[in-house]
Amino acid sequence: MGALDVERIDEVIHGRLRLGIMVYLADAEVADFVELKEALGATQGNLSVHLRKLEDAGYVGIEKSFLGRKPLTRIRITEAGRKAFAAYLEALEAVVGKRS
C-alpha cells in the first residue's frame, strides 16, 4: 500500500463519528440534531464538535430555527460534502484494494 493512496483519505471525514454523520446524511440528505444524535449514539457535546468540523470544511450546512417553542437544528449535506464523501470512498477503496 503506497503512502500516496493513504494521503488521499480525507481526515475531516475519516473520524468515526464524522464518517457516521456523512454516511447518514448521504442517504437521508437532511436530519435534525436529535435524530442524528440517536442514530449515532453520540452525546450532544460530541456531536456538536464533529458537526462544527464538517461545517467548517463546507461539507454540511446547519440551519437553526424553532418548531413552536422548541429549538430545531437541521443538518444537510452540501454539494461539496457529497463530492468529498464520494472522493473519500474512492480513496478508501483504492487503499483497501491494494491489500489483495
Image (tube, rainbow, N blue to C red):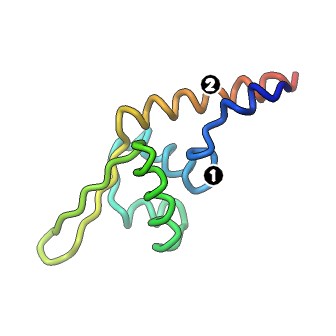
Crowding near the residue tagged with mark 1, few <14, some 14–19, many ≥20 C-alpha atoms within 10 Å? few
**Residue 93 image point, x, y percent:** 69, 26
Label 1: which secondary element: loop
Left or right of 86 in this view: 77: left
Farthest residue in the left direction? 68
**Quarter of the figure that contains the C terminus:** top right
Residue at x-position 16% and y-position 68%: 67
Give the vertical position of 87 relative to 23 (above or below).
above
Q: Could you tell me which secondary element the residue under label 2 belongs to?
A: helix
Residue 90's disc number: 2
**Considering only vertical position in the picture, is 66 above or below 100?**
below
User: Callout 2, which amino acid?
Assistant: Glu
Q: Residue at x 83, y 25 (%)?
A: 2
- Write the residue at 53% across / 60% down: 40
> Label 2 neighbourhood size at 10 Å, few (<14), some (14-19), many (20+)?
some
Q: Earlier in the sequence, mark 1 or mark 2?
A: 1
Question: What residue is shown at x 51% (from left), y 59% (from top)?
Answer: 50
According to the image, label 1 marks what residue? 15
Which quadrant: the N terminus?
A: top right
**Left or right: where does residue 75 sit relative to residue 90?**
left
Nearer to me, 59 or 70 = 59
How far across and how far down the image is residue 42, in percent? 53, 68
Looking at the picture, which amino acid does disc 1 mark? Answer: Gly
Where does residue 46 sit, x and y in percent of width and height? 53, 69
Q: Position of residue 83 (x, y in %)?
A: 45, 29
Q: Are marks 1 and 2 in contact (CB under 8 Å)?
A: no
Indicate which disc residue 36 carries: none
Estimate the spatial distance between the alpha carbons at disc 1 and disc 2, rounded to whole Å. 16 Å
